[in-house]
Image (cartoon, rainbow, N blue to C red):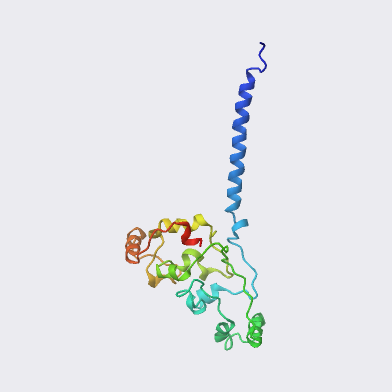
Amino acid sequence: MPQIFKRSANTLARASIVGTLLVVGGLLGLIMAIGQSSYVTRAQEYIDQPIQFSHLHHAGDDGIDCRYCHTSVETAAFAGIPPTKTCMNCHSQIWSTAPILEPVRASFREDQPLRWIRVHDLPDFVYFNHSIHVKKGMGCETCHGRVDEMPLMLQENSLQMDWCLTCHRNPEQFVRPRTEVFTMGYSPPVPQSEIGPRLVKEYGIQSLTSCSVCHR
């Protein structure tokens, strides 16, 4: 029986298989890269707000503590969005006629809340509790970045599951003393490799990676 395929067909078949695998692998890699890009995660993206509130000015220049505005961060899952009355505690006395603050004054006069747009907006299937992270010595800066250096608020990190798991798997690399949770620019007094394991033991921190911890 005469040979149907030439010997070169073997090489062509191998090259086709390898080429197909490379193309599929490349496409999968591209999809993963896009999924982790800021285009999808919205990290490093400024979001228009009813008032372009500056954390740089309030938290940085004026040194206002996070808890003055985010009052429930130590006791509840949600850190809390300050009501207009909190803004007016100061701005009824200073910059009380500034045109840029007219929406704040109107909100207070009309008893209508400002419609802030959430910057760190997790999907509905993700459960996150601020209070337990604060109690376990996880600083605001760890997740939110140096908000005291942000003229406008943005999402510093991807907030994707692999990013969360980096801390959940190795909490000793990120934990800080509870007294320093709200400190921006915190630097450990001794190497983190020394203080981290000690705080993990003292605060009873577990390396929680079970799906049910965050997905309920």
Which image quarter is the N terminus in? top right
| Above or below 172: residue 22 | above
Q: Which percent across, then down, holds residue 21?
A: 59, 35
Of 145 and 40, which appears nearest the observer? 40
x and y percentages locating residue 207 in the rendered image: 40, 58
Q: Residue at x 65, y 88 (%)?
A: 109
Across and down, in percent, residue 167 comes to 44, 58
Residue at image location 55% in from the left, 86% down from the top: 89
Judge from the rendering whether residue 19 lies leftward or rightward of residue 191; answer left or right.
Answer: right
- The number of callouts visible is 0
> On screen, 167 above or below 69?
above
Q: Quadrant of residue 202?
A: bottom left
Q: Is residue 198 visible?
A: yes
Residue 152 placed where, x, y %? 59, 70
Q: Is any part of residue 65 visible from this angle?
A: no
The quarter holding residue 99 reads: bottom right
Q: Is residue 184 left or right of residue 45?
A: left
Question: Is 207 located above or below residue 21 in the figure?
Answer: below
Which residue occupies the extreme top position in the image? 1
Left or right of 142? Residue 7 is right
The one of 96 and 45 positioned closer to us in this rendering: 45
